[in-house]
Image (spheres, rainbow, N blue to C red):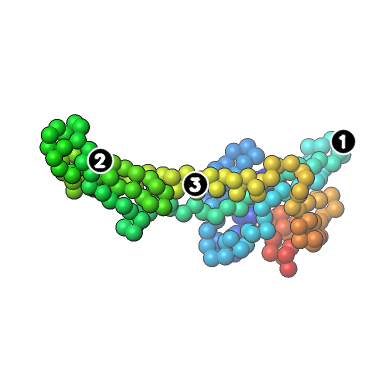
Amino acid sequence: MFVDQLLSAYLKYANSLKLKCVLLHTDFGHKMVKITGQGAGEAFKNEPGKHVCQRIPETETKGRKHTSVVSVAVLPIKKDTWEALEEKDLSIEAVNLGGAGGQHGNRSLSGCRMTHLPTNTKVTINGRDYHANAREARQILTARVNESRRAKVDADYSEYRKEQFQGGHRSGKLRTYNFMEGRVADHRLGIKSGNIKGIIEKGQFGKLFK
């Protein structure tokens, strides 16, 4: 319930700033939304971490306080990692590999060995047409280098997300929403607000940090 409430508050906050929101994924207890527009990163920079909700739910018949925790991560949109390889980063050699090419392969330097120097990634193509070999080697090398870049970006992204979630436990909480007392406490910034209704129902997060 609190996941839905918090997301709704974030969407209202984003709308008040004229930011564009697209819901990417929704599941029980897990939401993912893409927010774009001028100042989007600045607007949500204070939100990563654990948000604690304290209240007596309407469904609670014995008046007991319930505490739940929501973890929030604010991540930059992944950039396209595909890039053409720069000539200065390449070592290109004409090589004589022989083998299946028969005597012609043994007599000419028609093979191509291409190396991406920054990553030491190598591709060797052996055929009778050097220029065709060079084109194919570049295509394969470009794909391999960019796949390596993408894998690193994904790994860094996952680690950054993990750091922001901090395991989802109650320790190290960022903010507490106490519905019974009508207040919000931001533990990182050391500030409190009695405007929990405005924050949750109207998305007035900006007023919390003023």
- Label 1 residue SS: loop
Q: In the image, is 196 to the left or to the right of 63?
A: left
Return the disc, 3 or 1, that comes first in the chain's sequence. Answer: 1
Q: Determine the residue positioned at 18% across, 48% down.
A: 131
Calculate the distance from the C-alpha at mark 2 to the C-alpha at mark 3: 27 Å
Q: Is residue 144 above or below residue 10?
A: above
* Nearer to me, 34 or 123: 123
Q: In the image, is 132 to the left or to the right of 45?
A: left
When asked about the image quadrant of residue 43, the answer is bottom right
Q: Residues within 10 Å of mark 2 (few under 14, many from 20)?
A: many
Q: Could you tell me which quadrant the N terminus lies in? A: top right
Q: Determine the residue positioned at 72% across, 58% down.
A: 199
Q: Determine the residue positioned at 76% across, 61% down.
A: 189
Q: Give the residue type that dot 1 points to.
A: Lys
Q: Residues within 10 Å of mark 3 (few under 14, many from 20)?
A: few
Q: Which mark is residue 62?
A: 1
Return the disc, 1 or 2, that comes first in the chain's sequence. Answer: 1
Q: Position of residue 149 (x, y in %)?
A: 44, 48
Q: Which residue is mark 3?
A: 152
Q: In the image, is 27 to the left or to the right of 204?
A: left
Say whether residue 99 is visible. yes
- Label 2 residue SS: strand
Calculate the distance from the C-alpha at mark 1 to the C-alpha at mark 2: 75 Å
Counting labels gives 3
Q: Is residue 124 above or below residue 44?
A: above
Q: Which mark is residue 125?
A: 2
Q: Position of residue 62 (x, y in %)?
A: 87, 35
Mark in the foreground, 3 or 1: 3
